[in-house]
Image (cartoon, coloured by chain):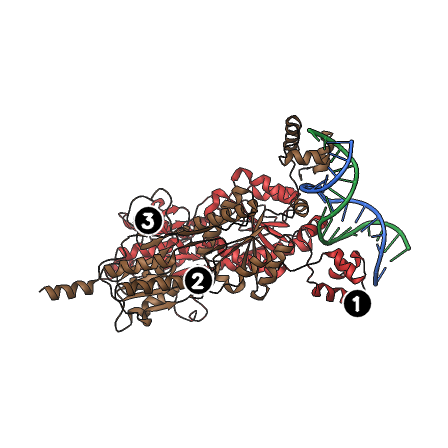
Chain colours: A brown, B red, C blue, D green
Amino acid sequence: MPEKFVNLKQLSECLGLSQTTVSRALNGFPEVSEKTRQRVLAAAAEFNYRPSPSATSLATGRTRVIGHVVPLSFHRMINPHFSDFMGGASEAYARAGYDMLIRVVREEEEESVYRDFARRNRVDGVVVHGPLVDEPRIPLLKSIGLPFVVHGRGGGEALDYSWLDVNSRGAFLRATEFLADLGHRRIALVNGLETMNFAHRRRQGYETGLAARGIDLDPALITSEDMVEPYGYRATLQFLALPQPPTAILFSSVLPAMGAVRALSEMGLRPGSDVSLLTFDDRLSFLQSGAASQSADIPFLTAMRSSIWQAGQRVAEMLIHQIESKSEDTVQELWEAELVVGRSTAPCKELSRSLAKEVS
Amino acid sequence: MPEKFVNLKQLSECLGLSQTTVSRALNGFPEVSEKTRQRVLAAAAEFNYRPSPSATSLATGRTRVIGHVVPLSFHRMINPHFSDFMGGASEAYARAGYDMLIRVVREEEEESVYRDFARRNRVDGVVVHGPLVDEPRIPLLKSIGLPFVVHGRGGGEALDYSWLDVNSRGAFLRATEFLADLGHRRIALVNGLETMNFAHRRRQGYETGLAARGIDLDPALITSEDMVEPYGYRATLQFLALPQPPTAILFSSVLPAMGAVRALSEMGLRPGSDVSLLTFDDRLSFLQSGAASQSADIPFLTAMRSSIWQAGQRVAEMLIHQIESKSEDTVQELWEAELVVGRSTAPCKELSRSLAKEVS
DNA sequence: TTGTATGCGTTATCAG
DNA sequence: CTGATAACGCATACAA
């Protein structure tokens, strides 16, 4: 039986009040008497009244919906990184009474989609994913006045908009130095697509780290691709087939790092003792144990860690705040990744050997 | 500069026509003259007219939005399986001009959320994810008349609603027999949560397969948990520590299967030659190589394969069709998983040994 | 083939 | 503190 329900008009008739008063009581306006408000609230609960989203939206211009626009070309963004981010965001939306709207678009449509979102109040704001080194969406969104928060940052210096990013450059600098300090001189980088700004920054951190330790850059030790598991597998096999293979490999994500583990395993090599692996780790949920066994055992992979789930939560909160406060203020957050030493890194064997030689 | 835009009224004034005629022309009604229609279409394009979703929705009761309700308790559903499904669905929505709405809810809210979705036209329909053996959402949705398609099936016999499922029972029956026919007698099962109907069915297939090959069921060889990587890792270590360890392990997902590979690798064992691994494989996108290297090399893991991405697409299409045709007809699709033999399965060594003994 | 008038369910403006 | 009344932007039954 489709449960009966009432609209505002019917509810106000039941109460012998005007729609105006009932609406005000429900929306917490101060000028309604406490007695009336209680009566209205009780009736609303009894009749299970819910306002119609489309009517509210038409009247107010606000929708309580946040948009996520996914270009078809980025469609690989529907991957574990993206979905963990969305998981965190959707949690924050739920808490604040918002819904998440996802729209997949062809690249050439993207601009007009944002314009329509703004003009026709399809959403109250949007999250910008995967900013490129040169990111056209940011000036566009600013010009049309649609509230947005960027997960990451665009390139360039004009960072006068709200964003949340992890310090990619710092993380990869630190990771590179860490490996160098273990004696590794041939350190490979399995990076993400360097059109993405985060990958660009990671590359910078890596290069700075090498320079800081007086290590020459070897282009043969760097790859840049979509961060999936088979990519790490292939890259690792290729590296190990080099005349002078790397003794350590740095990964932009656990996904290719897992591929590397598979490659090593097939070759009968062991992470850590044979080749050191260090990865950026977004704390993807499908790799976490339940709370039970989350205890103190040493993690398998040494990693620079930062939870992308939490980033999603925070970005959502920032955006909702921006929408509700209506302020033009921008907020920037730069998160530091945490170095967690696991069992996949070890001092460089070659170095130990050459040191031994020198001593003897 | 926030680009100016027009509403229907302004557009009709520019044209010297009534709103009605313009509306009809735009929506393809037959009674408008071709000449007028062309004029309207041209003007709409010139002024970049777009109807307001909230107004349209208020007037028609339809939203062109499909809802996906995610209970907080299932929140781990935001995992690679879920997101690949959503990737496929969102593609289909985009093609048909629909948007995807995601709402995370506390479990006790779920019923009222569906009711509100229906009554207040928040969405035109919903997709039901992860049906349980005893699934209350299905009768609820039927009773309130909100169009829905189930990804999977509920338990019981009354399957009088639209669903798309893979033949889990058949797939696990086949997988079990395949392993048994390789000589394995101790076959473990690393299953998903058996409150989920798909896991329940997989278990049935497994048991039927054992019975068909005259193998006794050993409860010590069965586990049932959330399908994440560390689960497969732990389960594998536990199995191998048994007095009589299994010689083959069957997994409900590649995620725990990857954990198993890691466990074997740490123990110095190799998949296939030492322990056979066979997994259900949803073709998760982050594990696929790009088209380039998708060529004929033998896959690493032997698997029962069925693309969850495609399932998402198809479910979305079914739901949209149901909504737009307004028919009460239900559609059921049962997809067969494909057995793809990789390098992680091999004849049982123990058996070979005992056969050798018998012969000598 | 086109136009008029009304409704969809709210919120907001302005009186009282 | 409360209540008419007018938007909000579109679709549609009914007229012409």
Q: Position of residue A333 (x, y in %)?
A: 43, 51
Q: What chain letter is assigned to the residue under label 3?
A: B
Name the residue beneath numbered marker 2. A197
Q: CA distance from mark 1 to mark 2?
A: 50 Å
User: Does residue B190 appear in this view?
Assistant: yes
Between B275 and A184, the one nearer to me in the picture? A184
Q: Position of residue A185 (x, y in %)?
A: 25, 66
Name the residue beneath numbered marker 1. B34
What is the number of the mark on residue B234? 3
Q: Given this view, does label 2 or label 3 mark the residue nearer the observer?
A: 2
Residue type indicated by callout 3: Arg
Do marks 1 and 3 both belong to one polypeptide chain?
yes
**Does B196 sit left or right of A57 as displayed?**
left
Q: What chain letter is assigned to the residue under label 2?
A: A
Q: What chain letter is assigned to the residue under label 1?
A: B
Residue type indicated by callout 2: Asn
Q: CA distance from mark 1 to mark 3?
A: 69 Å
| Helix, strand or loop at mark 1 | helix
| Helix, strand or loop at mark 2 | helix
**Does D6 sit left or right of A91 as displayed?**
right
Within 10 Å of the Cα at label 3, are there few (<14), some (14-19), or many (20+) other Cα atoms? some
